[in-house]
Image: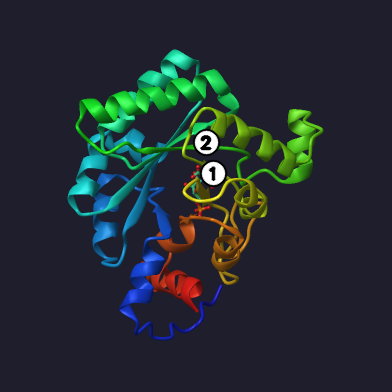
Amino acid sequence: MPQPQLSKISNEDSVSWASERIIVALDGMNENDALNFVSIIPALRWVKVGCELFTIAGPHIVQKLRKKGLRVFLDLKFHDIPTTMAGACKSAAQLGAELITVHASAGSEALKSAQDGAMVGATMADLPQPTLLAVTVLTSWDTDSFAKQLAIQEPVADYVDRLARLAVLAKIGGCVCSPFEVGRLRCIYPEPFRLVTPGVRLDFSPVNDQQRVMTPSQALQSGASQIVIGRPITTSLNPKQTFLEYCQALTC
Ligand SMILES: O=C(O)c1cc(=O)[nH]c(=O)n1[C@@H]1O[C@H](COP(=O)(O)O)[C@@H](O)[C@H]1O
């Protein structure tokens, strides 16, 4: 699809404001790809290391990215019994990731254990406490498939509320949700509760396998603290330009 001409972003402050709010998912990359990719976007502040990159590159990729001055969201979406959640989050916190995902549907005991584990890990490594983010309903679910395949009769938005409540009761610091649910959650849970939304696209970007999608500015205006964007930037012929276009879309 053709992309619009980049109109010059002259205001460095706007780019810097926007780049704090955009987390680029380093999916489909190995270690070399990821390190090369981040070096071509000097304005980049936040990156997400997901299952793909972590599995091929190993834990030290988090430290390598941090050494480049980047802030790391470690998205391994832990979903397990309480003891395993505690151990996994303890290990993740020792790597220096600032955001770490767990699945809210693991339940309140597992979420509490995850939170405790993360605190222990950060203390052991003498690092600041990371924020755990509880993943609610994945943005790749459309409402019909969600109801039919999982036999959940509750509307997605209500189910997201229910999962977010579990997270809040477990003292988890934020949630991942789609831009469609973020407004409702923000009304109930003000900042500093972190609401991070993937499923974000500018009109010229293909939605790929995302189903509950909005634009970056709609997501932020609805209450998102940060947005996650992967393929529109990582598969672009000019990732730096596309990153700046997404920045611009947040600031104009
Ligand atoms: O936890 C996530 O980051 C996540 C949750 C969710 O509901 N949907 C979702 O897409 N993600 C992640 O956000 C990124 C979105 O990538 P793109 O669709 O390429 O922008 C991927 O790395 C997903 O793993």
Compared with 245, 26 (above or below) is above
Compared with 33, 63 (above or below) is above
In the image, what residue occupies the spot 29% across and 66% down?
41
Q: Nearer the viewer, residue 241 or 113?
A: 113
In the image, what residue occupies the spot 75% across and 32% down?
149
| Quadrant of residue 39 within the rendered picture | bottom left
Label 1 CB-ligand 1 distance < 8 A: yes
Compared with 53, 171 (above or below) is above
Disc 2 on helix, strand or loop?
strand
Confirm or deny contact between disc 1 and disc 2 (CB under 8 A): yes
**Amino acid on which disc 1 is placed:** Val
Is any part of residue 124 visible from this angle? yes
Q: Which mark is residue 106?
A: none
Q: Which mark is residue 176?
A: 1
Disc 1 on helix, strand or loop?
strand
Residues packed near mark 2 inside 10 Å, few (<14), some (14 to 19) or many (20 plus)? many
Can you give x and y, in whole percent of width and height, for residue 164 in the image? Answer: 60, 37
For label 2, the residue is 134
**Mark sitting earlier along the chain (1/2):** 2
Q: Relative to 115, is 138 on the left or the right?
A: right
How far apart marks 1 and 2 lie (CA) works out to: 6 Å
